[in-house]
Amino acid sequence: MKNIKICFIAIMASVFCFSCLVDDEVENTTQNESLARVYGFKEDVTLGNFVGEPGATFEMGVPVHYLGGNNGLPDNTEVKITYEIGTIEDLGLTPTEYATIFSLTKAQRIALEDGNAEIRDFVDEAIEGTHFDLLDATNEVVVPANQTFDLIDTHVYNDALDASKISFYVLHLKTIITSGNTVIGEQLKSTIVKLQLCRTDLAGTYTINYSSGPQPHVITHLGNGNYQLDSMMGWPGSGYTSYFYACAGQLVFTEWQFSNEIIQGVPGYVDGSGNLVFSQFGIEDVYSGRTYTLVPN
């Protein structure tokens, strides 16, 4: 199966702007073996998808990695790094970068650009002690000797999360308190932790009423809010398998077996009747701007 890009029209122009900055930094760091040992987050966004379960407490670990330097050899003694909860304003993101990270609509992005809204109007800022807890009271992550990563362990609380929204917080690496030629990568010291509750109840047979007549589509739950659709919308019969997730109130396609790019102008959603609704939907070079409604049988 081939990977595809998911293009949200409102943010397509710079869909990789934020992540490429970090990826380039990792590549440059790991290739220059004469540098000090570099530690940090591998990703600018760390995703936590959880199956909604009232009363549940979820365990989540956010990894801190040895990223390169010293000929690719990690420290032979443990490395301690302190961390703290940061603010998203510290990252200096643009409205387009916000839209990319949080799957905002075009209207939401424009509201940010015009100064008529802030990111917290569209997503929830998770609060330590309410939505999650950091389990190490010292706020230190310890990478063992000759190892390449350790986890910042957290508990995430189902009942505090809004199932219809993304919740987030920012983790920021502060200082290395171990002696030696070891540094925190400047562009690798922060990650946005996204917390999402996912639906597991959408499997079944659905019908789309095409102009040529009704057509059945089978949706299979693959676990943790990830789903398989037996045929891409607009194609008759099975054999055009695609994949999407249903988390934080959004239905977002992630993969299709063909090279055409899926375009979602806005994320899909489940309406009050249990229908799956995809508007502003398209396949690059095939069709665009369509609305498809999958009605459960």
Image (cartoon, rainbow, N blue to C red):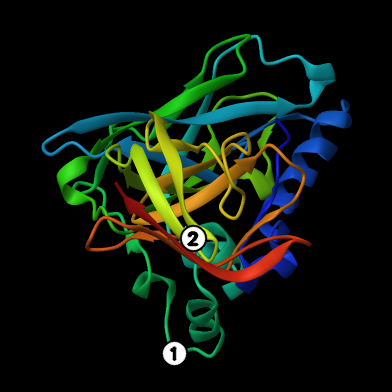
Amino acid at the residue labelled 1? Asn
Q: Quadrant of the N terminus?
A: top right
Q: Is residue 135 above or below residue 197?
A: above
Q: Nearer the viewer, residue 7 or 161?
A: 7
Residue at 53% from the left image edge and 90% from the top image edge: 114
- Residue under label 2, please give it: 102
Q: CA distance from mark 2 to mark 1?
A: 18 Å
Q: Nearer the viewer, residue 194 or 9?
A: 9
User: Where does the image place residue 15, in percent across and percent down from the top left?
Assistant: 68, 60
Question: From this viewpoint, which residue is outermost toward the front?
Answer: 212
User: Where does the image place residue 25, in percent across and percent down from the top left?
Assistant: 77, 44
- Residue under label 1, please give it: 116
Would residue 200 be seen by someone viewing this image from the given angle? yes
Report crowding for label 1: few under 14, some 14 to 19, many 20 or more residues within 10 A (C-alpha): few
Residue at 56% from the left image edge and 21% from the top image edge: 149
Mark 1 residue element? loop
Report crowding for label 2: few under 14, some 14 to 19, many 20 or more residues within 10 A (C-alpha): some
Q: Nearer the viewer, residue 196 or 249?
A: 249
Amino acid at the residue labelled 2? Phe
Q: Nearer the viewer, mark 2 or mark 1?
A: 2
